[in-house]
Amino acid sequence: MSIRWRLTAWYSGILFITLLVFSMAVYGFVHLYTYDELKSRIQQLYNKIEPVLIFNENGILVVAPDRSSAQRMEEADFYVQTFTYSNRLQWWSENMKLRGLEFDVPSISKGQREQGFKKTNVAGYPFLIYQGYVVEEDTNQIVGWLQVGAYTGTAEKTLDRLQSILFTGSLATLIIASTLGLFLARKSMKPIQKVADAANQIQKGTDLSVRIEYSGPQDEIGRLIDTFNGMLARTEGFYKELEDAYAAQRRFVSDASHELRTPLTTIRGNVDLLHKIWAGSSEERPNLDEETLRQMSVEAIGDISDEAKRMTRLVTDMLSLARADTGQTFERDPVALQPLLEEVIRRAQFLPRNAEWHTGDLAVLNGVYVEGNRDYLQQMLFIFIENAFKYTPEGEVRLDVILYRGQVGIRFMDTGIGMDKDEIPHIFERFYRADQSRGITEGTGLGLSIAKWIIDVHEGSVEVVTKRGEGSTFIVWLPVIFAPPLE
């Protein structure tokens, strides 16, 4: 158990005992005062009663209070009952007759033990009764039993309410005091907890920029926090440069290995084609005439040359790509989209794939330009195409275009594995890959993040529609420049 919890437990325990003693004292005092006063009044009235022997309406001798005493009792809301032992007749005050009440009367032998005050229930109502023998003065003989009672329901209800108030108030006070005690204990221990948390973060190596905020007095805790913050500042300064250099190197290597793979794949595809044409067996060699074979070879060599040049440019520009987060941009010129997409589509057929590759009509792009960088636009297109091939083990990958309100939409559709909607906000983060593809599909998770940076620099946007098991659709929107149709 932490120190703040122990302090709170101690405070709460002391407060609980104090409240318990106080509540018991208050309840006992009120209970004693209420019943002592009532007992005093009952006994005073009992002593003023003068029981007499009278004959009732049937001519039978009964013990009854004198008229003035009975009237005083009824006016004070007391209940009077007498019992004559000789003929076992009872006399009741008018209020007892009206309510149909009757007190229990002991025998002469048991009456000695039951003289005095007694609490009882009569017809479900609580009463406090003072009772005793009626003795004839001349003969000193017991002739009857006199009982004077008072209804105590109101007093008991008051005491019950007081008990509830004391219990509820004590419980509420205990809860509030415990909460405030925990708050004050936590507040007093917070600076030390901050030191412990910061030390724990440093021990785990998660964040060296942590500083402990403290605005209290410069006591022992204040001096400890100042010393600790100074140590953190020096430690952060020692490791910041090393950490930045390592992060830049790691980003550079990851981006380079990813981006150089696409041109290398195209070169390898063309080399394999040339090998089949000129060094393969007769079964593998296409059944074409020499002129056609020569034309295919020239195109393949041209692709190889172009990709080698692009690799050189990519290596040169890789450092600027690694600094994309700093806001670095590149020069942009008008780029014709139709020839760019036609060239990308032709080269895409050499990429490794299992899905069928289909393209839409590109005639709508005749005369449509975008202001950008051809190499980076080509790089972005290959990223989306290769990504579609990669996550479509079977089915179809399709590319088509849309013109809408001064923008061109390049749509990449596949029928691959797709993904969940909650993954869409993360797919453009560096190194992020959908859980389903981790460890199955080859890649580093950098392609879409680089493509998103290229789109942002070209002042474009990207839409994503996907469903797990049904495929994904990416639409890249770029602002266009319209020019006269191409010849």
Image (cartoon, rainbow, N blue to C red):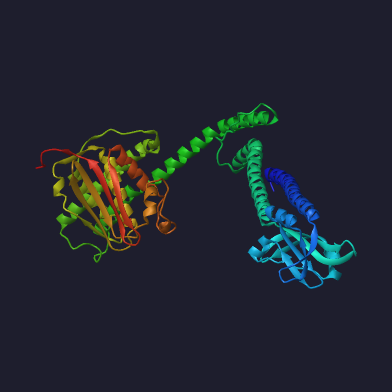
Identify the residue at the far bottom of this view.
87
* Residue appearing at x 69%, y 44% in the figure: 8
Residue projecting furthest to the right:
139
Q: Name which quarter of the figure residue 50 lies in.
A: bottom right
Q: Quadrant of residue 284?
A: bottom left
**Vertically, is 180 above or below 352?**
above
Image-based side of 405 in relation to 242, left or right: left
Return the residue nearer the eye: 64 or 175: 64
Task: Give the quarter of the figure containing the C terminus.
Answer: top left
Q: Is residue 314 visible?
A: yes
The quarter holding residue 371 reads: top left
Query: 158 or 342, which lies in front?
Result: 158
Residue at left offset 53%, top offset 33%? 240
Q: Name the spot of residue 318 as percent of width and height, x first.
A: 37, 39
**Number of marks in picture:** 0
Instruction: Give the image location of residue 108, x and y in percent.
Output: 84, 69
Question: Residue 187: x, y in percent?
Answer: 63, 37
Please provide percent x and percent y for residue 179.
63, 44
